[in-house]
Amino acid sequence: MVSEYEVKDIKLARAGRLLIGWAETRMPILLKIRGQFRREKPLQGLQLGTCLHVTKETAVLMRVFKAGGAEVALCGSNPISTQDEVAAALAEEGVNVYAWRGETADEYYRCIENTLSYKPRITLDDGADLVTILHTKKTELLKNVVGGTEETTTGVMRLRAMADAGALKYPIVAVNDAYTKYLFDNRYGTGQSTIDGIMRATSILFAGKTFVVAGYGWCGRGIAMRAKGMGANVIVTEVNPLRALEAAMDGFTIMPTREAAEVGDIFVTATGNLNVIRKEHMLKMNDGAILANSGHFNVEICIPDLEGIAVSKRSVRPNVEEYRLKDGRRLYLLAGGRLINLAAAEGHPPEVMMMSFADQALCVRYLTEHWKELEPKVYKVPDHIDQTVAKLALDMMKIRVDVPTKEQIKYLKSWEAGTI
Ligand SMILES: NC(=O)c1ccc[n+]([C@@H]2O[C@H](COP(=O)([O-])OP(=O)(O)OC[C@H]3O[C@@H](n4cnc5c(N)ncnc54)[C@H](O)[C@@H]3O)[C@@H](O)[C@H]2O)c1
């Protein structure tokens, strides 16, 4: 099949097919949906513009869309998260791929524009960069678009801000906010893969280390939980009193960042906010402190501050940059402050991406059937899709659950019965 593409090296396709094949063995729900899509062709002739991390799991989703009859263009949602083997394999399979690991900022946005040049009917975004370009630089293409989906918390926040400002021009389903997405992907996916990324980058021992997690949201709690499981002493920093209280009752130590800075060995941000770790904190850190980010953008650790206080900088391992301060202390920044789990490891495990991407596939189908009823707003994932994905996941895990009796259903909907 012929496709137009720009990838690192098309000869990597064979290695990419092996990676995708491995992911498929761990993503049976997507294979089931692919079978349905192949039979029913719900996306026949539909042009999809997708901006997602180009990983082996994303490739499995792209195959679902192709099976459903869609034409797919794909670019990366981060300049350094693309798995080049996977991009090559997808290009060979007829996906118009514009992605490689190590894109410059200009190249990153050029890839988004190339993806948009196919005039998508439906967009899939992870972080809302594609939607933003569509609404700012490529407004002439908006008339073709009937709907979109958004994969991550930061993207949903940006889209809500767009909708509030009256700037959003078509309906977008917030896939991130499905229970079958954030409860599992953000928590267990980011939890495991962030630790994996730090370990692959540094090879350090976690046991006995003081590990600081900024943000006790769905990602932060997963990271904290897994770091604790590895034997680290975990400190959580927060700005939201409720979340701080939860972290305290989950058994973590809570303190302001400036105090945590003095005792931490490893710092990981997962807040979706900017300049969470900055000069005033860096200046207090111990020699050898490691800084990593798992939030969507590389703004959580203030890199200009780090550059400003350092007298020298050198690369000491792949994904590890050593910054030397005036007094000789060394701070280590991982993956340039970009998503550590995708930059230094392989992103989330296929089992969790199976659920997030089942939501994506079913939401795209939903949009093709319901776009006429929707307004240019950010929508929740329909409850029936969430329930379907949860049931499918339980089936695949061979877990059976009880079914409420008719009497119980009636009781739960009544108010008359009380204390006996
Ligand atoms: N690495 C990945 O693969 C991956 C996966 C999913 C989401 N994300 C990204 O991770 C980020 C967090 O997502 P989430 O779902 O956990 O969001 P969330 O909204 O559930 O949690 C964010 C938390 O950070 C806290 N916070 C905000 N500013 C802070 C500050 N200055 N100091 C300390 N805490 C602060 C908030 O109070 C909140 O509790 C987002 O950018 C999201 O897009 C990354």
Image (tube, grey):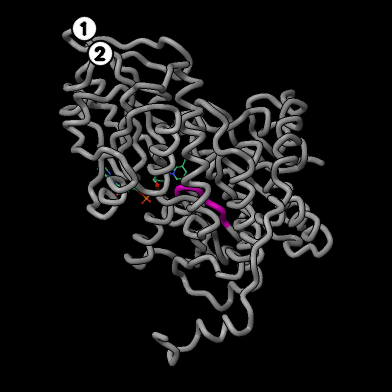
Image quadrant holding the C terminus, namely: bottom left
Given residues 156 and 210, the one toward you in this image is: 210
Q: Magenta segment: does it hold 127?
A: yes
Q: Which residue is mark 1?
A: 328
Given residues 199 and 404, the one toward you in this image is: 404
Is residue 230 something that shows in the picture?
yes
Given residues 88 and 81, the one toward you in this image is: 81
As drawn, 214 above or below 320: below
As drawn, 134 above or below 283: below
As drawn, 171 above or below 418: above
> Residue 195's mark?
none
Label 1 or label 2, whichever lies nearer to me, is 2
- The boundaries of the magenta stretch are 123-129
Q: Which residue is mark 2?
A: 287
Is residue 299 something that shows in the picture?
no
Q: How many marks?
A: 2
Rendered location of residue 208, percent (x, y): 35, 21
Rendered location of residue 45, percent (x, y): 74, 60
Residue under the image location 75 percent in, 40 percent down:
25
Tell me whether the residue at label 1 lies in contact with that at label 2, contact meaning CB atoms closer than 8 angstroms.
yes
Task: Report whether 89 appears left or right of 119.
Answer: right
Residue under the image location 38 percent in, 42 percent down:
220
Q: Magenta segment: does it hold 269?
A: no
Q: How many neighbours does mark 2 have within 10 angstroms: few (below 14), some (14-19), or many (20 or more)?
A: some
Name which residue type carries label 1. Gly
Q: Of all residues shown, which one is farthest toward the top?
A: 328
